[in-house]
Amino acid sequence: MPRVMHVDKTDFPVIVEIYNNEGNKAAQKYIRENYGMVNSSYVIKRIKKSEAYHYDEETDRFISDKKNNEDSKLFMNLDELCDTRGSKTIRAEINVDSKKDAMESLVKELISDRLLELSRYIVMDTSSRIIMIDVTTMEADGYQVVTH
């Protein structure tokens, strides 16, 4: 018997199916046995509040909201954004033909970062051939200014 203390929203369809086919007591029994939760009615309340299902009180059944299910595949909800336990890392796939291209890309990115940092302190006016340097701010930010 697995002792998982959290029922993820991806587990809702199984619980909803049991609830709709076998009833509330069977769904709560399933939650207690498979997730080790004493207060299984809390999970049922979460499903009722979920945007993925509509609870019909007259028929005592959950109805899947397909529009919200399609939207949930496209966008993350607050539970997924705040969930630190099952954090999923997303890796960007980069097509790099060779090590040379990868190195060139890295150098360009580093140079771009350095130039962006310098642009906070240095302004060049090419028409009047004047370079203005904010030495006070540079020193306040921890840089040493050396002229020669």
Image: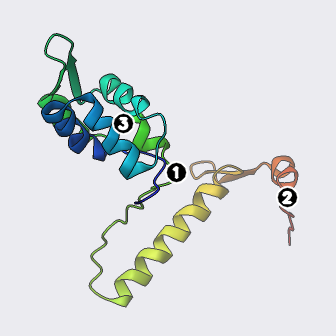
Of helix, strand and loop, which one carries label 2?
A: loop
Q: Which residue is mark 1?
A: 84
Q: Which corner quadrant of the image does residue 77 belong to? A: top left
**Residue 32, image x, y percentages:** 40, 44
Q: Marks 1 and 3, how far apart in space?
A: 14 Å
Of helix, strand and loop, which one carries label 1?
A: loop
Tell me the kind of residue under disc 1. Answer: Thr
Q: Left or right: 89 with respect to 115?
A: left
Q: Which corner quadrant of the image does residue 110 belong to? A: bottom right
Give me the disc on residue 77: 3
Q: Earlier in the sequence, mark 2 or mark 3?
A: 3
Q: Looking at the image, which residue is at 34% across and 65% down?
A: 92
For label 3, count other residues whose C-alpha is less than 10 Å away and answer few (under 14), some (14-19) or many (20+): few
Q: Which corner quadrant of the image does residue 93 belong to? A: bottom left
Q: Earlier in the sequence, mark 1 or mark 3?
A: 3
Q: Is mark 1 in CB contact (under 8 Å) with mark 3?
A: no
Which quadrant: the C terminus?
Answer: bottom right
Q: Left or right: 120 with respect to 134?
A: left
